[in-house]
Image: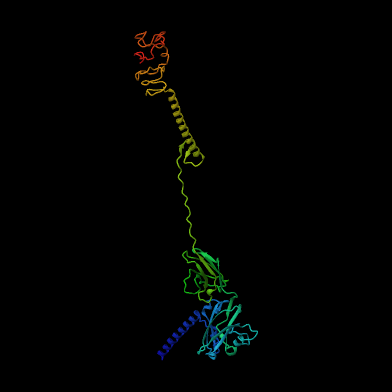
Amino acid sequence: MRRHFFRLVRFGGAAFALAALLLAWGIAFPRTIPAVHAGGNCANGCVHWSSGMIYAGQNNGNPEGPVGEHAAVHGEGFTAVAGQQVTFAVAPGDTLNPPSGSSSAQLCQMAPASPIVPLGSGQVDSSGQFDYSFDWPDAASAGLWSFCVYGTGGVPTGNIDDGPFSVLSAVSPSVAISAGSVAAGGTVTITGQNWLPAQDKIFVYVGPCADCDGAPIASGNATSASNGAFSITLPIAANTAPGQYVVSAHNESGVLDLMDKGPKLTVALAPTATPQPTATASPTLAPTAVAGGTSGTAGSSGGNGLLIALLVVAALLLAIIAGLIGFVIARGRNTTPGGPSGGSGPSGGPGGSGPPGSGYPANTPAGQYSRPITPGGYPGGSYQQPGANPYPGQYPPATGQTLFPPADPDAPTEYTPTPPYYP
């Protein structure tokens, strides 16, 4: 008995410890159970929002976003309309918590004055499931909205969803660019609006197409503020091929995606670099002395020096020419007609003949005289006949004496002087 008692105590203690551990785990890590399951009422069908529409830690785990968001839902438990074509709409309010005294079916009830916004239609499979995607309509632009399913004749199935969708902006997300064109090697600034709720990892890119296999020419991640705005500057590579590109963006889950609705950017050829002239110091020429100027110096000084030098040279040439002319004239004056060459002329020089009374006797030996004897006698004296010398051995005559006696008009005209009187 005692042995069984201790076993029971040990077993009870272990069970108590396990219960305490499970309780502590439940407190530390509480399970979040979707509201749709809390009521346990999925007989008429349940609708679940895409997880990309729910942001962790925001809006109590319910979906939210702007108009234009790419919404998606999954339906299950629609066995009553299995295999049938159904229609979809969004209705204002919360099907989990309809107005007092009404039901989810009544909240989705279509009426002529109802603010319900139709979406489209889809097929329910044989197991009662379906998947449907749509862009949040502009008509459902504010407040809380629930997803409704309608069977044959537009009768609501009375379905419920995980929780209402909260519309954060009546305007779709968008981007704008700082300029419509940019040269390769430049940059473009892209700004965004209405990217709600505030989030990071918004992929912004410029590419040949949106969400395609073409590699972007520029891209980066942006973070939106509480108002949904962002700004990012992207460089365009210098080797980018010229052409037109699409500017687009999407968030991490893809429910916010511009696709090809973004602006177009034209990329032009990179400008060709123009080589800039390099300043080079010009060598200074050493001055060279030139009459009237300085060589190597631009200006009037060098020009005047050259002119003066030319004038000096011209003056020298003129002086030389004048000297030559004067020399020729002087030589012409000092030259006796009929010179030593014995040529014919009025004087009849030595070795030649001349007219009678020319001063030189005919047939006079060449080289006998240094100058002619003028008619009428030797300078300073009178003419003397041959063989007569009043003063033998005396030359020149003494003062007051004449070399020859007065000329005899009857004497012969030929005369041959005898040295040493006429060297």
Foreground residue among 168 and 361: 361
Residue 353 position in % (x across, y down): 38, 20
Looking at the picture, does residue 13 appear above or below residue 235? below
Query: Quarter-wise, where is residue 156 in the image?
Result: bottom right
Task: Give the quadrant of the N terminus.
Answer: bottom left
Residue 85 position in % (x across, y down): 55, 88
Q: How is the image coloured?
A: rainbow
Left or right: residue 358 versus residue 147 is left
Foreground residue among 154 and 312: 312
Whether residue 310 is visible, yes or no, is yes
Whether residue 291 is visible, yes or no, is no
Query: Quarter-wise, where is residue 343 in the image?
Result: top left
- The single residue placed furthest to the front in the displayed view is 410
Looking at the picture, does residue 214 appear above or below residue 281? below
Foreground residue among 16 and 79: 79
Residue 276 position in % (x across, y down): 48, 54
Count of numbered circles in the view: 0
Foreground residue among 336 and 296: 336
- The single residue placed furthest to the right in the displayed view is 113
Q: Residue at x 41, y 88 (%)?
A: 7
Query: Quarter-wise, where is residue 86 in the image?
Result: bottom right
Task: Give the quadrant of the C terminus.
Answer: top left
Residue 219 position in % (x across, y down): 49, 69
Q: Residue at x 43, y 25 (%)?
A: 332
